Image: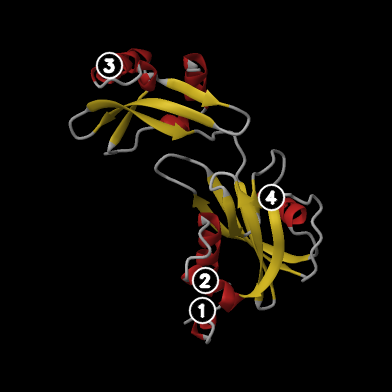
Amino acid sequence: MRNVELYFEYINKYPDKFTNADRSGTELVCDKAGIMEIEEIMKRRMRENGKPEEWAEIGVVYQDCYITILRDAVLFKPHNTPGTYIRQFNAGSVCGVVILPICGDEVCLLRIFRHSLRRYVYELPRGFGNLGETEEQNALREFNEEVGGTVRSIHCLGYVYENTGISDSKTALFLAEIERETKPSEPDESIDKVFFMHIPEFLQMISDGRVEDGFTLAAVSRALVTGVIKLKLLLTNHIK
């Protein structure tokens, strides 16, 4: 479902997403003649290797209401070797949010089913951002939907990119001081349970590999290094 016209619309509308940094290892080709030349080279390469020619098509190669995938024409340095590069394109979308909910010396955690893994995992509350809302408003909305209850205070810990090798998707990390009661406004059938555990026990779960979600690990890491979660907690007997 390659769409070249939309691809060039994106080049004109979001020029910052199609720039070339000085001395970059991969030069993005944006002129139509250069793109078509590289596409023909790559189609020939696909034929020679018994692969479908459409794997070389440049443009918007997939799009729905959740995700847009581009295949760019590039020149790989230092020899200007022609090639293609797939990336997830998120220009114009809203920053996602992750919330680290703390109540005293406890953290609020979810046990949630993830379709991509086909199993349950432990995660912090998180979700997509909505247009027209600030990042903090998005964080509060997601917390209210998945956990619920009273938020005493909330502040941003910074940002993380989920996979810089393929995506420009950006997520804001928040810490929220909350009351212990929970009452989700939009109960999600994929969430098996919402529960509290002492921070040292939670850090032990991370240490022994029971917490695997990258967003959760990023939020906790940022909270630790900025001192929001006191490092002295690591010295308790809960961490073996």
C-alpha separation, residue under disc 3 versus residue under disc 4: 43 Å
**4 vs 2, front mark:** 4
- Whether the residues at callouts 1 and 3 have beta carbons within 8 Å, the answer is no
**4 vs 1, front mark:** 4
Q: As drawn, is 111 to the left or to the right of 41?
A: right
Q: Kindly identify the amino acid type of the residue bearing the numbered disc 2.
A: Leu
Q: Which label's residue is closer to the chain start, 2 or 3?
A: 3
Q: Which mark is residue 190?
A: 4
Residue position marked by numbered label 3 in the rendering? 47
C-alpha separation, residue under disc 4 versus residue under disc 1: 33 Å
Which element is circle 3 on?
Answer: helix
Q: Kindly identify the amino acid type of the residue bearing the numbered disc 1.
A: Leu
Q: Kindly identify the amino acid type of the residue bearing the numbered disc 3.
A: Arg
Q: Which label's residue is closer to the chain start, 4 or 2?
A: 4
Residue position marked by numbered label 1 in the rendering? 231
Residue 40: percent from left, percent from top:
30, 14
